[in-house]
Image (cartoon, grey):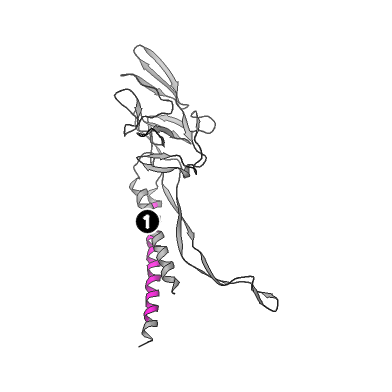
Amino acid sequence: MNLSLYSAATGMEAQQLNLNTIANNLANVNTPGFKRSKIEFQDLLYQRPRASGTDGGGGNLVPTGIEVGNGSRVAATSKVFTQGQLTNTGEKLDLAIQGDGFFEVQRPDGTVGYTRDGSLKLNAQGQVVNIDGFPILSGFQTIPPGAEMMISEDGNVTVTTPSGSQSFRITLTRFANPSGLRSLGGNLYEETGGSGTPETGSPGEQGFGRTVQGYMEASNVNIVEEMVNLIIAQRAYEINSKSVQASDEMLQNVAAMKR
């Protein structure tokens, strides 16, 4: 059996998934709070016709053996939670997180999701919601119509109306392993066994990030870096296809020997 055909095929499949990941990163370059994914590879099992350290005769041990690999596979696609650039929008309800933390979002099924997207809105009832209308939890209270809302870097919110002012403090949530969060789409993540349990705290305290009003966190996708990764993936795919072609030509030569 010609293992090079199968090994090259696994390499082509892995690079196709790599290309899909890069394409998704580039597609979300303008998505607020988006975190790029990186793909991680592993080599497959090895065939060992001769193992190292075996008896070579006369009490001598073989210093090196024979190992033939079976290709590669994608082991994981993990999120990279580096800080995205903060952009000044001037909108009072735009709230960026500078540092560690997520906003809590109540999903339609009653479960809690988590987001870095701080493009907040007010619904008809004065609730702070995301762009899909899902209520933002994180300690937000109902905002009266026509009120002016000021948010400090430590999460203190002051709501001023003609009849007076009130204040409250919002919270952020973080995880021991944010890369273990499950992506749900719509700029939302959910907790998994790999992410750890959520920890809640106040902005600017105990390692939590600060809240910056009037700013939006942009995607952390670097277009130049992704384009370089795209070229590398394309060349790797092409080289693996050359291995398939070379293996095919070798099999053709073997078949021609019977003529």
Which of 90 and 143 lies nearest the eye of the viewer?
A: 143
Q: Which quadrant would residue 88 be assigned to in this image?
A: top left
Q: Hey, what amino acid is under mark 1?
A: Leu
Relative height, residue 201 to residue 247 (above, below): above
Quadrant where the C terminus is found in the figure: bottom left
Q: Main secondary structure of the magenta part?
A: helix
Stretch in magenta: 226-252
Element under label 1?
A: helix
Residue 73, given in percent of the width and then of the height, sits at: 45, 59
Specify the farthest residue to the bottom.
Answer: 259
Which of 79 and 192 lies nearest the eye of the viewer?
A: 192
The residue that mark 1 highlights is 19
Give the residue displayed 51% in from the left and 40% down from the top: 196
Relative height, residue 43 to residue 160 (above, below): below
Specify the farthest residue to the front.
Answer: 109
Q: Residues within 10 Å of mark 1 (few under 14, many from 20)?
A: many
Give the side of residue 91 with respect to residue 102, left or right. Answer: left
Give the residue displayed 40% in from the left and 47% down from the top: 222
Quadrant where the N terminus is found in the figure: bottom left
Residue 208, given in percent of the width and then of the height, sits at: 50, 33
